[in-house]
């Protein structure tokens, strides 16, 4: 009977541009320190530092993936990709979360092996190199902090930097314990604690990314509350087939069917749609809306169950 469609992508586009700048800066910082750490480990003959440089390499790859996803996510929609490429950022977030959990499991295996057979560690050298890594990671986390609350892709990159920061703290603590007391078991013991913290932090990102890909209702929106608010609009008698989902971080969409009275009993469709749009935007922050107005009895007619109606 009537349809309403409203797009509000300008603000999301601006956030995406900011995310790209943050990710690019952090990528440069991480890549520069990775090279410095690899060269330092090779010159000093330190296997621990070379291994950490390898870990940094995985982070650089994750940051590059996040930056690529942020860039391609800004490509315009077309006839085959009617929502554009925004979901690439969610896929990147899912990949980053999965990678972090996999790295943590690998750390567990290595740590338990080293606990059974502690290996000599150059404590002082590892400690000072780790201090440099900690500074780089803290700067990276600070740069990404502003976007992590509104973008899953940036949050995944931020978590990678957090992983490295925790690894640096652990390396400092383990290096100090080895240097001061000769406790070679301290390095793998700290690694187990760090791995557990990383899994805890990554699990939420993994669940949220999967929820977006499965078209789940955003966690900050109560679907029953949305339905009740729509029923409070004048001339709305019932609401059915109501869906709210996330296209990408900060861009929620809603579709629904609204039953109204017969034409002589109600206001014009344009007024009802305007009230619904205004309320949904102001109360729930929903911008991308598709609302179908239906007369009383339309659902019972059976047309909605037939293909092509």
Image: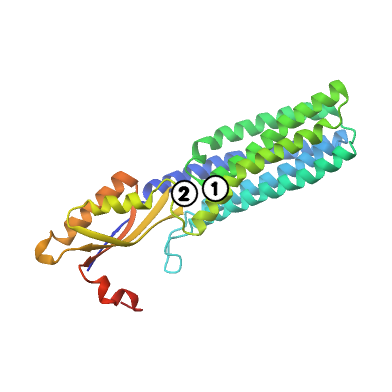
Please give left or right for residue 269 compared with residue 142 in the image.
left
**In the drawing, what numbered circle is on residue 47?**
none
Rendering coords of residue 27 (x, y %): 62, 42
Q: What residue lies at 27% left-to-right and 50% top-to-bottom?
A: 229
> Gap between marks 1 and 2, in whole Å?
8 Å
Rendering coords of residue 63 (x, y %): 62, 46
Please give left or right for residue 298 compared with residue 122 in the image.
left
For residue 261, what is the image quadrant? Answer: bottom left
Which of the image's four quarters has the C terminus?
A: bottom left
Q: What residue lies at 88% left-to-right and 39% top-to-bottom?
A: 116
Rendering coords of residue 80 (x, y %): 45, 69
- Front-lying residue, 64 or 145: 145
Q: Are marks 1 and 2 in contact (CB under 8 Å)?
A: yes
Q: Residue 27, can we see it?
A: no
- Front-lying residue, 51 or 263: 263
Residue tagged 1: 153
Which of the image's four quarters has the N terminus?
A: bottom left
Residue tagged 2: 249
Say which label, 1 or 2, has the lower sequence index. Answer: 1
For residue 271, what is the image quadrant? Answer: bottom left
Rendering coords of residue 103 (x, y %): 72, 47
- Front-lying residue, 48 or 189: 189
Q: Residues within 10 Å of mark 2 (few under 14, many from 20)?
A: many
Q: Secondary structure at mark 1?
A: helix
Q: What residue lies at 18% left-to-right and 59% top-to-bottom?
A: 270
Q: Secondary structure at mark 2?
A: loop
Q: Residue 182, can we see it?
A: yes
Q: Residue furthest bottom?
A: 307
Please give left or right for residue 250 compared with residue 44 in the image.
left
Q: What residue lies at 14% left-to-right and 60% top-to-bottom?
A: 268
Is residue 97 positioned above or below 289 on the image?
above
Q: Residues within 10 Å of mark 1 (few under 14, many from 20)?
A: many
């Amino acid at each position: 009977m009537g349809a309403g469609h409203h797009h509000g992508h300008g603000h999301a586009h601006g956030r995406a541009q900011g995310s790209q700048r943050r990710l690019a800066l952090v990528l440069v910082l991480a890549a520069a320190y990775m090279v410095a750490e690899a060269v330092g480990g090779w010159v000093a003959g330190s296997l621990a530092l070379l291994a950490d440089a390898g870990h940094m390499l995985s982070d650089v790859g994750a940051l590059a993936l996040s930056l690529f996803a942020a860039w391609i996510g800004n490509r315009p929609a077309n006839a085959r990709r009617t929502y554009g490429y925004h979901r690439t950022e969610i896929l990147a977030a899912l990949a980053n979360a999965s990678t972090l959990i996999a790295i943590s499991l690998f750390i567990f295996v290595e740590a338990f092996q080293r606990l059974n057979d502690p290996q000599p560690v150059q404590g002082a050298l590892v400690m000072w190199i780790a201090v440099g890594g900690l500074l780089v990671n803290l700067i990276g986390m600070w740069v990404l902090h502003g976007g992590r609350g509104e973008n899953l892709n940036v949050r995944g990159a931020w978590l990678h930097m957090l992983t490295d920061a925790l690894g640096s703290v652990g390396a400092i603590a383990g290096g100090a314990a080895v240097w001061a007391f000769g406790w070679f078991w301290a390095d793998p013991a700290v690694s187990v604690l760090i791995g557990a913290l990383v899994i805890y932090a990554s699990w939420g990102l993994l669940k949220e990314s999967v929820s977006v890909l499965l078209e789940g209702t955003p966690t900050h929106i109560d679907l029953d509350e949305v339905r009740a608010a729509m029923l409070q609009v004048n001339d709305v008698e019932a609401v059915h087939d109501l869906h709210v989902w996330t296209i990408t971080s900060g861009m929620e969409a809603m579709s629904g069917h609204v039953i109204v009275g017969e034409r002589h009993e109600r206001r014009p469709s344009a007024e009802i749609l305007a009230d619904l749009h205004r309320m949904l935007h102001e109360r729930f922050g929903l911008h991308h809306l598709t609302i179908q107005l239906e007369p009383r009895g339309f659902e019972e007619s059976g047309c909605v169950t037939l293909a092509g109606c």
